[in-house]
Amino acid sequence: MDFMADRLDDGRRIRILTVEDVFTRECLAVEVDTSLVSARVVAVLGRLVQARGAPAVISVDNGSEFYSRTTDSWAYRQGVRMASRHAARCKALHLSHPPRASQVNDRRVSDDRGRHRR
């Protein structure tokens, strides 16, 4: 699950919520609007759970959009664990601290000894 942003021809910003099955690479939902609050995220997830059942884990990026009381309480009630991709990447790279956003965007991360890994 991830957010993207774009700009319309008239300059207005839009937000795009995408929900993808990481195993089948199937796009399960796309929600587009000028504002997507956590209640809308929960509504989209609720529709997916009704249609397909609840997953064990939902992988999210490190964006603040996914960390709200509304989203947390929904996940708790559904028995779904929200896992941060950012934290998983740090664990896979054996980092004791999360990389800076510029390092993640550059697709390079320095470990504690200054080496770079891709």
Image (cartoon, rainbow, N blue to C red):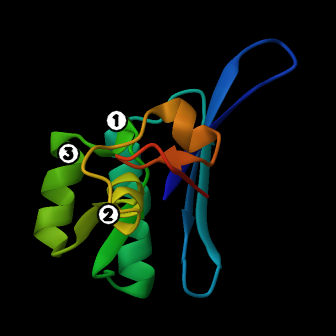
Q: Please state which of the two labelled residues, at mark 2 or mark 1, is closer to the viewer.
A: 2
Report crowding for label 2: few under 14, some 14 to 19, many 20 or more residues within 10 A (C-alpha): few
Q: Please state which of the two labelled residues, at mark 1 or mark 3, is closer to the viewer.
A: 1
Q: Is residue 80 above or below residue 42?
A: below
Q: Position of residue 66 (x, y in %)?
A: 33, 45
Residue at left offset 45%, top offset 43%: 114
Q: Is residue 45 above or below residue 48?
A: above
Q: Is residue 57 above or below residue 68?
A: below
Query: Residue 91 bears which disc, if any?
Result: 2
Q: Earlier in the sequence, mark 2 or mark 3?
A: 3
Nearest the camera: 5 or 33?
5
Farthest right residue in view = 9
Q: Please state which of the two labelled residues, at mark 2 or mark 3, is closer to the viewer.
A: 2
Q: Are the two marked residues, 2 and 3, in contact with CB atoms closer than 8 angstroms?
A: no
Q: Which residue is mark 1?
A: 64
Q: Amino acid at mark 3?
A: Thr
Report crowding for label 1: few under 14, some 14 to 19, many 20 or more residues within 10 A (C-alpha): few
Alpha-carbon distance for marks 1 and 3?
12 Å
Q: Amino acid at mark 1?
A: Ser
Q: Quadrant of residue 29?
A: bottom right
Q: Position of residue 107 (x, y in %)?
A: 63, 48
Q: Earlier in the sequence, mark 1 or mark 3?
A: 1
Q: Position of residue 18 (x, y in %)?
A: 58, 56
* Numbered-mark total: 3
Residue at left offset 63%, top offset 42%: 32
Q: Amino acid at mark 2?
A: Lys
Query: Residue 70 bears which disc, if any?
Result: 3
Left or right relative to 89: residue 81: left
Q: Position of residue 117 (x, y in %)?
A: 56, 57
